[in-house]
Image (cartoon, grey):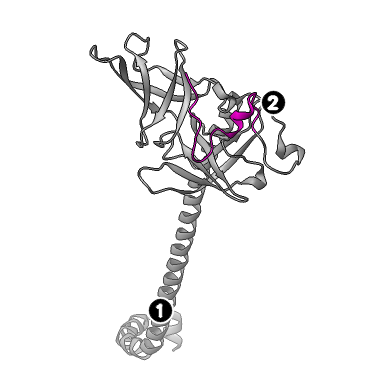
Amino acid sequence: MTVDHRQHHLDSVRAALSVLVYPLQWVVDLPHTSSEWFRESLSTRRALQEENASLRTQQLVLNTQLQKLEALEAENRRLRALLDSSFQVEERPMLIATLLSVDMDPYRHQIELNKGSLDHLFEGQPLLDSQGVMGQLIHVGPFTSTAMLITDPAHAIPVQVNRTGLRTIALGTGSIDRLELPHIPNNADIRSGDLLVTSGLGGRFPPGYPVAEVIDVQQDPGRTFSHVTARPRALLDRSREVLLVWPPGAQNPLATGTTGKAEPDVDDPGEADAGTETEPETGSP
C-alpha cells in the first residue's frame, strides 16, 4: 500500500477492475435511471401538449380578433366615405342609419333601417350613401323604417344631365344595376358616360347629388324617343350604412330636441303628400 501510494504501480490494475465492475454498476443503477428518464419524458410531453393546446387557443382568439378588426376597418372606411359625402349635401340636418334587412322579392327593391319616427324621420325623406342617391323612405315606424330604392319599378326621381343640364326622369327597372330615362328625343344631347344628378325639383332630393351614369343610348330614326339606360352610382346591393338628410331650411330635430315627425319643407302644400308608399315622387322634367 505504501509502495502503491508512493509509486502508483497499481493504477493500471484499478483501471482494469473499474472496467470489469462498470456493467454491474450500470445494471444496479438502471431502475433509478430509467424511472427518472420516463418521468422527465412524460412530464416534457405533457408540458408540450399543454403548451400546444394553449398556443392553438391563443391563435384562434387572435384570428377571431383579427377578423373583427378587419370588419371594423372596413366599417370605418365606409363611415369615413359616408361622412365625407355629407359635405356635398350642404348644411343640412343628417343622420346615419344601418340596414336591418333587405326585401328578397326580386320585383321590389326595399330595405329596412334601424331608425324611425322616434328619430324624427318622415315618409319621403331622401336616402343617400357615399356614392349617390339610394332612394327614399316610404314607411316610418317608431323604431324602424322602410325605404324604396331608386331601382324599384315603382320609383322615379327627377334628374338632369350634369354636362348639358337636360332634365328628365330616372325610372326604376327592377334591375339593381339599371335605370331607364324615358321620353328623351332622338336629337337630345346625351351620350354614354354622362353623369345624372338630382335636379332638385320638388325640393325632396338635394340638387346636384349624383344619381346614375348613362351607359347606353340607342337612337332609332323610326321612333320619336331614344332608349337610354343608366347605372346607379350608389352601391345599392353593398352599402350597409346610409345617410338620411332633411330638406333645405329644416331645423335639426336631433339638435333641438323637438318631438314628432319632421315635415318636408315645400312651397306647395300638395307636394307634402308626394313620395308616399303608394305614390313615390316622380317629378317632371
State whether residue 228 is above or below residue 77: above
The reply to whether the magenta stretch includes residue 203 is: no
Residue under the point 45% across and 11% down = 163
Number of marks in picture:
2
Question: Is residue 239 shown left or right of residue 222?
Answer: right
Position of residue 87 measured from the top left corner of the image (x, y, whole percent): 61, 25
Q: Secondary structure at mark 1?
A: helix
Residue under the point 44% across and 23% down = 169
Where on the picture, by quarter, is residue 217? Answer: top left
Position of residue 65 measured from the top left corner of the image (x, y, whole percent): 51, 54
Query: Which residue has dot 2 on it?
Result: 249
Could you tell me how far apart the alpha carbons at marks 2 and 1 are, in whole angstroms? Answer: 79 Å
Three-letter code, disc 2? Gly
Circle 1 Cα neighbour tier, 10 Å, few/some/many (<14 / 14–19 / ≥20): few
Image quarter (top left, top right, bottom left or bottom right) of the N terminus: bottom left
State whether residue 115 is above or below residue 281: below
State whether residue 118 is above or below residue 54: above
Q: Secondary structure at mark 2?
A: loop
Q: Nearer the viewer, residue 236 or 190?
A: 190
Give the label on residue 42, or none.
Answer: 1
Q: What are the residue bounds of the magenta stretch?
A: 264-285
